Amino acid sequence: MTTVTIEQLRSAVNEIDGLAREGFSEIAATARLALAAMENPRTCNDLDTFAAAFEAIAGRAGDIEDCIGRAAEIVGCDSVDEHQNRRWNAREQSREAARRELGANAGV
């Protein structure tokens, strides 16, 4: 494992802080606007706009998660979710079994 300096850690923490503050502020603002629109009789039925707002929130959250994860990973401080890894492995095994079964049935 590569040794990480205090300055590299400080830089990573600063980057993560900036990403979190900016991104979470955007998410909160978008959510507040959507909630306010839901309280207005003229806009409460605009499902396309609400869907777009929720997609923007989900997209931004994913972007922040990826960026923060990369910043932490660079300095060796990324977290590993073993439960999630097992779920991904199980899903991949299930997909592989389905592909094998489909291939076997195609030859029949």
Image (cartoon, grey):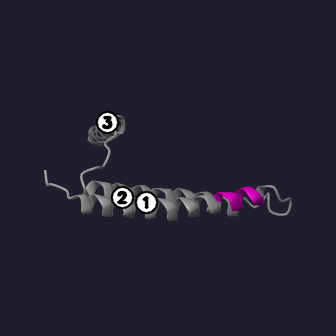
Say which quadrant the C terminus sits in.
top left
Please give the residue where the numbered disc 2 appears in the rendered image.
13
| Residue type, numbered disc 3 | Glu
* Whole-percent x, y for residue 37 in the image: 76, 60
Pointer 2 local density, CA inside 10 Å: few below 14, some 14–19, many at least 20: some
What span is in magenta? Answer: 31-37
Residue 106 vertical placement versus 38 (above, below): above
**First-in-chain label (2 vs 3):** 2
For image coordinates 28% across by 58% down, the residue present is 9
Residue that label 1 marks: 17
Circle 2 or circle 3, nearest the eye: 2
Q: Are marks 2 and 1 in contact (CB under 8 Å)?
A: yes
- Nearer-N-terminus badge (1/3): 1
Residue placed most toward the observer, 50 or 74: 74
**Residue annotated with mark 3:** 82
Residue drawn at point x = 47 percent, y = 59 percent: 20
Q: Is residue 75 magenta?
A: no
Q: Is residue 94 left or right of residue 6?
A: right
Circle 3 packing at 10 Å, graded few (<14), some (14-19), many (20+), is few
CA distance separating discs 2 and 1: 6 Å
